[in-house]
Image (cartoon, grey):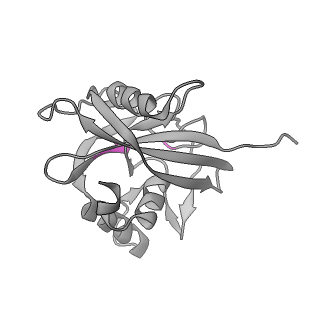
Amino acid sequence: MATQHPKVGVAAVIGDANGKFLVGKRKGAHGAGESLFPHSPFHSFGILRACDGGVETEGAGAWQFPGGHLEFGEDLVSCAERETEEETSLVVKGAGLIAVTNDVFETDNKHYITLFVKCAMTDIDAVPQLTEPEKCEGWHWKTWEELKQIDEAARSGASTDRLFLPLVNLIKQNPNVDNLM
């Protein structure tokens, strides 16, 4: 049996002047390929789901930041900038690593270390574009409190809206958004 090793994902944490963060709603499920986020190679159309306390935390309908796999030889800031532009057409400047999560998708038998990179838009008036409509329902700006409420509603069964596992874990580690700003 081959030894499995965690894969490295990079997520771009992009805030606006109103204290909101850019998140996209996935169309496909992580599991059939190499994906965590809605851009190659992070996106796939599998049907397996991870669970966190009984709440599905991956797949279609889960909210997440722009991001993707760290390519061989690529630095994480460049990865966050590249993935953001590919997925949203936004040009961002990465400021550096702000958080790391350990994301084990038990049902899917996948393990990721997700590196969160704080990024700023170079044009504050730019509007994110849906460059991959087959993979993402759209990009939206949500406050940290709104993201926490989505997670709480999913956990209570009050909503089918949910967050992707790396974002769930990020919120657990940083319930106060000031830790990430």
Viewer-nearest residue: 109 or 83: 83
Question: Residue 171: x percent and y percent?
Answer: 40, 62
Is 168 placed left or right of 7 in the picture?
left
Question: Residue 42: x percent and y percent?
Answer: 51, 35
Q: Residue at x 19, y 54 (%)?
A: 19
Question: Residue 46: x percent and y percent?
Answer: 57, 41
Q: Residue at x 50, y 52 (%)?
A: 100
Q: Main secondary structure of the magenta part?
A: strand
Q: Quadrant of the N terminus?
A: top right
Residue 97's image quarter?
top left
Q: Quadrant of the C terminus?
A: bottom left
Magenta span contains residue 28: yes
Question: Residue 116: x percent and y percent?
Answer: 43, 46
Instruction: Report the magenta residues as a range.
Output: 22-29
Magenta span contains residue 111: no
Q: Residue furthest front?
A: 95
Is 46 placed left or right of 153 in the picture?
right
